Amino acid sequence: MMSYSLCFYFSLLLCFVGSPLFAQEEEQVKNLRENLAENGKEEEDLSAFEEQLDFFRKHPVDLNHTNAEELKKLICLSPLQINNFFQHLQVNGKLLDLLELQSISGFDPETIANLQPFVSLNLSTPYAALKLKNLFRQAEQQLLLRYGRTLEQQKGFRDLPGSRYLGSADKLFLSYKYQYPKIGAISLLMKKDAGETIGRTKTPIDFLSGNLAFFNYRRIQKLVIGDYTLQFGQGLSLWSGFSLGKGPDVTSVASKDLGLKPYTSSNETAFFRGIASTIQLTKKLYLTPFYSSRKRDASLKIDTTGQLTLSTISESGLHRTAAEIRNRKRLSETVYGTSLQYLSNPLNLGVLAYQTRYDHTFSPDPDTYKKYSFEGQVLNNFGFHYNSAFQNIYFYGELAKASPGGWAGLQGAMTSISKSISMVLLYRKYDKNYHSFFSQAIGENTETSNEKGLYLGLNYLPNAHWKFAFYFDYFKFPKKKYRVDTASSGYEALTQLVYTPSKQLKITFRFKTEKKQQNSAAEITIRSLEKLLKNSFRMDCSWKLNKKFSSQQRIELIQYRKGSQLHELGYLIYQDLDYTGIPSKISGNIRLAYFNTPSYQSRIYAYESDVLYGSGSGGYYGQGIRTFLNLRYRLLKRLDLWGRYALYYYPHQKVISSGLDEIRGSKKSELKLLIRHQF
């Protein structure tokens, strides 16, 4: 049965050989989503990043009048490339033509091609031409409404006794954004997840977020009132929002901190709420004070003295059942502090200090792996970070201290050995009792603690047609952790080869291996650690037939093994076909995929095209067929409509999912509609 299925799908692939090189920005988003999902961040909201790329496409960055923070928003540039760019300007003066980028160390043809849609050499003087009438004429405004739902009835929506979903199955999202380039922005968004109620007295809108932001007015570089994020250093002390982590672009392990940013995503946890500002004290010295006060979802329990203590903070943002609604906004969180940064080229320094206070006490269980977790109500965090360039080597690092708690440190170096070879070396050490509620540093643990690691990454571009990437990450966990009752260790390695013989064809080969340790199965009487091995091989072919049609084929094999008892082998094969009708009003894409993986442990992630700013990372496991169709129709010049229908079909199953998400039958389908008006 399996051999016939494989033959059929291989034939399908061959029928399309001869077709997408996605648009550069779509390719960046695709790779980013897959990397985040493979690192356990499949729910990460990237809508703000996609909106930023869309904004720069309409308002390109002026390379002669920019700064490092602005260039960090363009994911295609590494910290070393950004540093080399400013060194080039310092020595040679302003760019006269974008072709000069070819002469800058580390700017290979692929980087320049990715960069070009978002940059220009036009003089920008934001406040010189500011007039009251231009606040609307020259501003970018967008109103977006999205609707979605699973078409089959899930168990939680049936009239059952006990726990059930109290709201409808509809998903609703409404967003309004106003942006005046380099001067100000307004954002407001509302969201309802499936199963949540809307219109009730206590919670008329489940999630409401917004902010008012001002930029570049005299010494006030940024001022945000409302919801915002903070990103400093390498993510050890203070980092909210998504971070890249490990991936085929080995330079992604060096975080590109953006400091203070208005929050415009729909994730219900990864932000601060209050007021923050970045003030220029001198030409190179910047101060960022911040204050945040908000309610968090939390599960509380009664201790032996009869007092309410904090069990866990919920990060899901879901309020569907009576229990989830009961835990909604039960915890008060107050965060305040400041960051002081010295920013210049080639040396940047930063120190920060802040306090996090809760109105209930964290009380970890001393008999579990959480025995070293934070205990108490008040946590103080301090950090020092730096980056500096010496000749062709970029050094960066951060040292962080928690009080009460231990230390965490990270030190890295990035270099261009030649025009075709670049390398990254990174060492990290996080104490078992280091605590931070807002840390997203590189690592294997879900929290930044109890870990040591050494990372080596290499990029090699022998010519314009070949690109080779490799990394090896060795890590140790000195104390027990989740599902590991003693000290353990492991490694992760990736090798990727990309062949681009022409602008119409791109072929990618990738091999990734992970080796860790985990407790033996519960039924084994002698408790010990077993080896956990996960290998995957991927081959991609992207073709562009003409200006309108393109296609992509992928085959991926995965092997999962735990000890000598459990051995799983799975695979995924899919075919995408894209249509971009220029100047037609209609565009869209379709996928047909076949997957066969024995369990969730051997799942495979693959990027999925979606409606505008929709989530796009599918997790494939079980045995079945996956297909989806996306369509975009331009109703008017500034009015667009998106639609999406997606289907999972499991021919050998009578029940899909579990718990309240259970569906009777062999298929699960989803519908999404989105309308956007720009004015």
Image (cartoon, grey):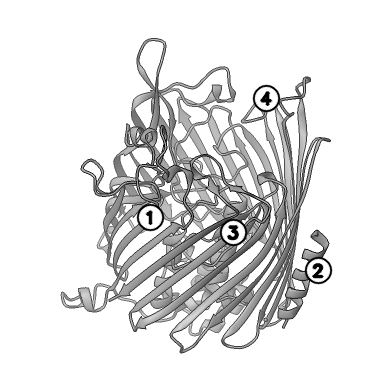
- The x and y percentages for residue 600 are 65, 46
Q: Is residue 318 above or below residue 571?
A: above
Mark 3: which secondary structure?
Answer: strand
Say what amino acid the circle numbered 3 marks. Answer: Tyr
Q: Amino acid at mark 1?
A: Asp
Q: Nearer the viewer, residue 373 or 535?
A: 535
Relative to residue 624, is residue 287 depicted above or below?
above
Q: Earlier in the sequence, mark 3 or mark 1?
A: 1
Residue located beneath label 3 in the image: 648
Circles 2, 4 touching at the beta carbon (< 8 Å): no
Q: What secondary structure is found at the residue carrying circle 1?
A: loop
Q: How far apart are labels 2 and 1 at the CA level?
A: 40 Å
Judge whether residue 75 can be spotted in this image.
no
> Which dot marks residue 170?
1
Give the Cα separation between the discs numbered 2 and 3: 21 Å
Label 2 or label 4, whichever lies nearer to me, is 2
Q: Indicate the secondary structure of the residue bearing disc 4.
A: loop
- Picture quarter with the C terminus: bottom left
What residue would you read off at disc 2?
A: 7
Judging by the rendered image, the residue that carries numbered circle 4 is 485
Q: Is tag 2's residue or tag 1's residue first in the polypeptide sequence?
A: 2
Q: Residue 365, how many percent across, how many down?
A: 52, 20
Q: Quadrant of residue 476?
A: top right
Q: Amino acid at mark 4?
A: Asp
Q: Is residue 358 left or right of residue 225?
A: right
